[in-house]
Image: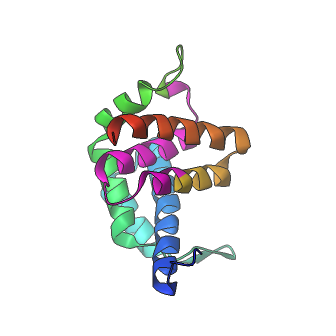
Amino acid sequence: MSSHATPRTAARSKARAAARLAAVQALYQHDMEATPIAQLLNEFHNHRLGATIEDAEYAEAEVDFFDDVVKGTEARLAEIDTTIAAKLAKGWNLARLDKAMRAILRAGTYELLARADVPVGTVITEYVDVAHAFFDKREAGFVNGLLDNIAKDVRA
């Protein structure tokens, strides 16, 4: 916590971090099972956000932020996927990416496109942190580089 952060802003930051992780999990589940978004939101609201499952305690998440990232990503999926695909190396496409990686990049790209209230550095750092929950350092570096590259275009 920086010297400028108050306990309230620290709690909000933690709640948003939890919301981002949950949003990536929801988007991953949607990609894997084609679970309708409304059903996913209901499941996460009632059974995951802030719950204890198999002795793992899920942090309290900022529910409105979680909903915005999940719904917004889904609503702008074509634009988001085009934005990501344009930054992938030659010969790569979204279908070649791991589904969890796709969910992380989609949520991060949504925030860069639609959440001007969230600083670029915060978006990138938070989704690199989410990547660490699923992947090794190399993949987290990929998330960092790709989101940074996207940010240069969409937040210029």
- In the image, residue 150 lies at what x, y percent? 42, 36
Left or right: where does residue 103 sit relative to residue 40? right
In which quadrant will I find the C terminus?
top left
Looking at the image, is 10 positioned above or below residue 68?
Answer: below
Residue 107 is a magenta residue: yes
- In the image, residue 108 lies at what x, y percent? 44, 47
Looking at the image, is 45 positioned above or below residue 98?
Answer: below
> Residue at (55%, 25%) from the top-left corner?
96
- In the image, residue 91 lies at what x, y percent? 54, 14
Q: Nearer the viewer, residue 9 or 55?
A: 9
Left or right: where does residue 45 sit relative to residue 14? left
In which quadrant will I find the N terminus?
bottom right
Which quarter of the picture shows residue 143?
Answer: top right
The residue range painted magenta reads 95-124
> Residue at (36%, 34%) from the top-left corner?
153
Q: Looking at the image, can residue 32 be seen?
A: no
> Residue at (52%, 35%) from the top-left corner?
146
